[in-house]
Image (spheres, grey):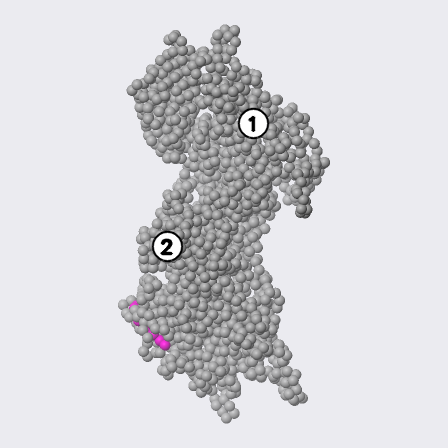
Amino acid sequence: MHYQLLRSGTAAAVASRRVRNILGSLLGRDGWMWRSHEVKLVSTSSGDTVTIGEISYKLKTPQNPELVPLKYLPDSVPQTVAQHLRWIMQKDILGQDVFLIGPPGPLRRSIAMQYLELTKREVEYVALSRDTTETDLKQRREIRSGTAFYLDQCAVRAATQGRVLVLEGLEKAERNVLPVLNNLLENREMQLEDGRFLMSAERYDKLLQEHTKEELDSWKIVRVSEDFRVIALGLPVPKYKGNPLDPPLRSRFQARDIYYLPFKDQLELLYTAGPNVAAERISQLLSLATTLCSQESSNLGLPDFPVDNLVAALHVLNTFPTLSSQQLVQRLYPYKSILGKDGHTAVESVLSRFELLDGRRQSAPSKVLSVCTSSEHEGHADVRVQTADKEITFQVPAGSKELRPPNSSLTFINTPSHSQLLAEMMQSHMVKDLCLIGAKGCGKSVIAREFAEMLGYSMEPVMLYQDMTARDLLQQRYTLPNGDTAWRASPLVTAAMEGKLLILDGIHRVNLGTLAVLSRLLHDRELDLYDGTRLVRWDRYQTLKEQLQFSDQQLQERSIFPIHPSFRVLALAEPPVAGASSSSGSSRGQQQWLGPELLTMFLYHTVAPLAKAEEMGLIQGLAPNVPEEAAEQLLQLTHGLRQTNDPTAQSLASSLSTRQLLRICRRLSQYPEESIAHAVNKACLSRFLPSLARASLEKALTNCSVQDPPDPAEQTRDHSYVVKDGVLTIGKVSAPIYNPNQKMKVPDVLFYDNPQHTMVMEDMLKDFLLGEHLLLVGNQGVGKNKIVDRFLHLLNRPREYLQLHRDTTVQTLTLQPSVRDGIITYEDSPLVKAVKHGHILVIDEADKAPTNVTCILKTLVESGEMILADGRRIISDPREATGRPNIIGMHPDFRMLVLANRPGFPFLGNDFFGALGDIFSCHAVDNPKPQAELAMLKQYGPDVPEATLQKLVAAFGELRSMADQGTITYPYSTREVVNIVKHLQKFPNEGLANVVRNVFDFDSYNKDMREVLIEALHKHGIPIGAKPTSVNLAKELPLPDVRMTGYWALNQGGNARRKLLCPTETHTIDVKGPAFLRVQSYPCHRQESRTLSFTEEKAHWQIPMNEVNIICDVVSSDDTLYVAMCNPVALYSMKERGENIQCMELYDVFPRTISGVWQPFVTVAPLGSPLDGQVVLHEEQSNTVLHLDMVTGAVRRLMLSPDSDQTPSRPSNWWSSKEQQGGHKMCRDFSQKNWLLFYKENGNQLEVLDVLEGRVHSISLPINLKSVFLVAEDRWLLLESNTNKKFLLTKPMHMAAEDSEVCQLHSISEDPVSAGHGAGSAEASVPQMLSNEQLPNENLSAALDQKIVSPNRVLADTSCFAQIIVGFPDLMSPNEVYTFKRPVDLSAMKGGESGSHGFFRGALRSDTAKRENCVSLLSANQVVRAIPPTKVPLRDIYPKDVTPPMAAAYLEVTDLTSKKLKYIPVPRSMTVSPYTSWLSKVSDCDVLVAALGSGSVVTVDMGGYVRQWETGLDTLQRSLMEWRNMIGTEDGRPIQITIQRDSGLDVSAPKHGKMDPSNAPHIGGNQWAGGTGGRDTAGLGGKGGPYRLDAGHKVYQVSQAEKDGVPEEVRRAAREMAEKAFKERLKEIDMSEYDASTYERFSSAVRRQVQSLRIILDSLQAKGKERQWLKNQAMGELDDSKIIDGLTGEKTIYKRRGELDPELGSPQQKPKRLRVLADLSGSMYRFNGVDGRLERSMEAVCMVMEALESYEHKFKYDIVGHSGDGYDIELVSADKMPKNDKQRLKVLKTMHAHAQFCMSGDYTLEATDASIKELTREEADEHFVVVLSDANLERYGIRPERFAQVLTSDPQVNAFAIFIGSLGDQAERLQRTLPAGRSFVAMDTKQIPQILQQIFTSTMLSSA
């Protein structure tokens, strides 16, 4: 063998001395025996004897000398060890088995081996692990040439051959394994599987006296040798983790405590190890180690110090005397990583006590200068390291490849911290194996690779995963071609034999019980394998060869192999969770993996996160053309996040690891125009973060001024893709199209393009071209699979598909074993095929598989290497792949696309993104935006009406945003909508309301959920739950006949009095301003009204106004509605279907005058293009004219007349209520044309304002005006003030300043039809409304019942429903007046008690109201006016026995086409302003009306409630049809099932169908034509009949739904039962009904939140209980990894699911600890009336109590109040949580009472501080404090920064503050200074429970 050539004698001597020193480091208790012992070896003729002290043992010559341990005995044995050896010898002579118990470390094993070497005994060594089964101890079957037979294993071999069985790690074995040995230990007897029976030596010898050996053999009895002994090595279990000893097993052993060597023995050892080191330093180090192993330190929760590694450390110190001790200690005992804050300080105090805190004084080695092959030591390298100003050269083991000088790699950019790390690693490498600890993506693997290349090592990466077994680590079974079973060495073993650098990646994942197998390899470099092979340390192997004179060949035949001297292990791990002793200390529930056992195995180095400058250098080195500023911003953001101690920020920072930053920068260097915000959001998957984390990310982004620039080209961007000349271009990115050899694997899928998915694909293509593997994360049903398939289809790439699930194992991912003819063959899984052939591997549902399984993808993605179960390995580097057997080269085109659902509730998958997110390029796939979704649905349902699609998109949009906020749990996705649309497309007659139930019936049993859903669907007008019969339109009354009542004659006679010329003059206006005011935006919650029944009301919403405000004007322009308020003056604007309501408060422009007598009254005029979105506001009394821009908030004041300063000139006599002066009026009929007309009542001047030109034309009149009506742009009707005489003013169309043509004034005489009454006797009427356009001709003809074409105007006054003046104003001949006369004049009715709030008003009615509330809808041929209920003929509308509804007003709709009259009630407003007299001046009923669009009007009631009404008959009819279609046609006829056989005859004519005899006839005289609601008959519930419906009467029709309904008496019985139960329950908890209803008020307000929290808690609890695979079972499913064992006939080859017992020694889960701090200060009570803050806080408290009821084992909570009386008013204590409603109500009452009677003052800060301090003292899994406060911090002079400090004062406590919004923007300012995600401002107190729910879901539950 070539191993011999590597060594010369000298090296062996050096190595053996070094190793002896290392292994001599063995410690024990101080000598409690004062006699000193010595070990003597005496040779006599009768054989050799060993004497220890006075005890002697006679040696025997071993049968197999190669099994005797070698080179364990040191030159001089320390006293303590000698005493241990003497004790073992005593027990050996007594024939007893011993158990050496003690702290972790190699000492116990070393003592056992020393004893065996001393007494020349052969050893059978077993390292027990949790995977050990009885077959590993007794017998295992193997197959040889088709026959299975038994091979003895260690215990049996030891017993029969008289060896010593060393069992190491008894605490690791599973409970039921070791009792197999009980009988062997006690009686030396054991029954074997192959029928043999082991029998103790005495009994056997007795039998031999009576029987021959042949007989005994035929009985299969085997003698157990009298030399057989067992030495067990174990840890004391309650202190360390593991399974406690089984009592029967324990009783069979004799125990000996092997503690560390006493101080002085240890000290001598260390002196010899470090001759160059000052003695004082050595004793300091040892003192530290001893202190940290003491009982006191373990009470503090500090793990034991690895004393055994001190020797190795001293070797390093010996070479580097200048190394600081603190750094050395850090390597041995990385306390900064393991321990929390308290542990930290404890260790530091010990360090300073022993003067070891010298880290700052002495510099670390700074860099490796050179590495070259060593001349004198073979297999070593000389390393020159720079420390401080010296260079030190030392030897380290090196690999067989050639060395590479440092800093020569292209892919490794050296940074100062990394080169220092490498130098330190070289130092440790000199003596021991290393472990690198660093967060994911910080470069551990890269550093490891660089380290290996510098030393010429070949690397052997082994990816560890959680359920890895000891077999996976060491050896696996396989079958030879002839069917024999054999063992294949794992990569770990081959690495050890070939001297590679073994990289154990992810040592933190593996179970400690499995890792224990390696402890002997790491400490002693020895290893026993399953097939009996032994690997021995190099120098021991050489000694063995010399002593026994064997050749390598002979030793290999005896299966003994040397471990190559250069072999080293480098472990990589993520940092242990600092301070987490508990099993769920962190969000991922990781355990604290770095325990005392692991500490003894490695020297630890931490890979610190890079400093900003270093990271910058790294990025620029690896992504050379990345834009400088972008990289700078990125790093600023990342380092900002890394430096906070806020756990949310920390978790965000972990997804921005160095690896992720590099990925972002590579992409930015390719596509520099991309925004950083986009990249960061993508890397953190911010779309799916909990809302708190998202908020804190956004805040961090804004702090670093990384804004997402709104993409101006977003709309114009090219979202298409083209394939041209073999090149695919998506958006702006192009890629060549692949030419596959397996065409059938290219997916082809039905895909409807939409811009959003195209953008996702463009994004994917960018990353794909950069060579990344992609991860797509999204909710279910958003089209992830479709996108991926489409993407691959476009690229023409073949795909392999893997779907993961709960039971996926590492084996199934890679290979599928199967048995053919007794030989195991492996089928390649899709993964392997994809790797081989260069296909794309699509992994679906990646989050369903356990993360420990998906982890193996990491090595594949990162290093391109992976070892398969059959021993083949995948390698990406073609150079390495050549010429090696069993290699699969990775095809360069191979890529992975992984799909996963978003982490968290309700998917409850495993957090794939958390574990592996940073090795993929992540893309969040969201539901398409509304436009994109609409476009896509149109393609799915081309025949579905667009209105329906829009409703669906809107409703689902709302449901999704609710799911994001956590109000509902299930995220409704595009998949659901597409299914609905497909159904509607195929069956268009089924109503939408029915089809959506296909999706929502899942939720039909969950009451709260159902309410939320129905509310959302109704809001968007999907009438779920409505019946086709519920049509409630207003009753129609006939109009009186139209009569021609007179003429209007335009007098043009020669009489000059009648034709007057009016002079005009023009001047420009003066503009003051602009001032800029804030335009606030409120969400508009528009609700569709036709949800359960069909009425004229179409939609309604509330304007967010103050309740004392008064609405004084409503006007619409196109689809925008403007509402003006006048107390204070404010203007609201909203789009008809808009999301938001804009509000502009003009409080500052119109300050209130003293005592508020001045009551401003405003009119609004919206301007037209090009001034869209701008309005002119006119205040009547002060004649103020303002021009407002609702977009920018600019306000300009227009001064119309230059002379007068327009201030109200009345403050002097404000008490004299002479209001007769008359106000200024504005005519806005032509404001769309950007001109307005102003006049003053009783004045004689008209002022025409041209807004665009900025001029005013004043026209002087010879008469005093009462009012002006603009009947056309150039003709205006004027009324004279006292006589009501009418004049028509005609003016030239364009007033130019130069030739100001004169305006002419014509008087109009009104002549009645019969002139017999004498001219002019008709009372001149005052029009309320006069249209400025004419009725269309067909409408005019319909109204007058005669074919007529003529100009006309519609006029309305109090005496008639409507008047039509034909010919006016264009024809000069007398115009005919046609009138629909009222029976009683409106003004004559007693209108005193008008309105629903009439009792306020009667006496106060002072003046006529200012707004007439009358509009004409010319295209619909209607006049609509709002009139008070008192003036409505209610008797005609409602039958006698029906009480009319309480209405604010009635809309009187006069339809001139059908000659019908309708009265539609407008519901009362919820609130009304207290200023009633003022209100009455605005309108004589409680609403204002404006027209909107062609066939509808809008009413706004005094409470700010806007309702949109559809009055036009045509539109109503159309809407009714649509509505019916949406409900679907349930016509009440039973469904018949017919089976049609094809008879071959022609189809006969349609049959009449059967009549349904049970269908009762309809009642109601001549109302109904056809009855049974069929088709084409006039009737109800039918379809296509002539439209006539009366909803006023009962309709007798039995619908199917009622037949299926529940009889009334059954319902009554159910109701009574419920009531009775309720009363019983109240009696039980002794609660009055009044109390019950009080509590119900609070409870019902938060029922929804409680419900959704409980759903989440339940499912988390269920997730915690998810069953795991139990392996090695005797029944269940076949375990693939045990197929071979199955072949050989073993029993325990099954696995089944079961509850996994918690791992022993893992601490119990403690409940989470929550404290709610409620503000009970006086201000809460004082302002409760304003915004209900106290009640909301009570609701929040109620919610906490209800949601956590019955989860006491998970959450311990208490509720504490704070007020001026103090900061710890206990409401609920943690040990007495309220159990029932009564106790909860008591808590709420206490809150209320306290707030009412407490002192004033604010203790928010102190309370928070005290609570945080108090909670940290309690043991809990996590701590939460939620502070509710209306802290007006500024008022008490508290700086918000102070508060922020308190909130984050302790990283262990998650503290949140909810502020109840105070005045102005104070709350927002607060939020800016407080940490993101920790503070919330609830402007609307209704949000408090929601915010609380958010806090719960995003933090507590992330780790419940």
Q: Which residue is drawn at 64% across and 44% down?
A: 1629
Which badge, 1 or 2, comes first in the chain's sequence? 2
- Report the amino acid beneath label 1: Pro
Is 1623 placed left or right of 1736 in the picture? right
* Residue marked by disc 2: 667
- Report the amino acid beneath label 2: Arg
Q: Which residue is drawn at 61% across and 45% down?
A: 1005
Nearest the camera: 990 or 1095? 990
Q: Position of residue 1032 (x, y in %)?
A: 59, 31
SS label for mark 1: strand
Instruction: Note whether 283 is above or below 1780 in the view shown.
Output: below
Q: Which residue lies furthest to the bottom in this view?
A: 45
Is residue 185 shown to the viewer in this render? no
In the rendered structure, which segment of residues is drawn in magenta? 379-387
Q: Position of residue 1133 (x, y in %)?
A: 44, 32
Judge the density around disc 2: few (<14), some (14-19), many (≥20) Cα neighbours within 10 Å.
some
Q: Main secondary structure of the magenta part?
A: strand
SS label for mark 2: helix
Q: Please tell me the numbered disc located at residue 1465.
A: 1
Instruction: Quote the CA–CA distance across marks 1 and 2.
Output: 63 Å
Nearest the camera: 1213 or 1494? 1494
Q: Which residue lies furthest to the right in this view?
A: 1557
Is 658 placed left or right of 909 in the picture? left
Q: Position of residue 1138 (x, y in %)?
A: 46, 36
Q: In which quadrant will I find the N terminus? A: bottom left
Q: Residue at x 48, y 9 (%)?
A: 1320
Instruction: Note whether 1371 is above or below 744 in the view shown.
Output: above
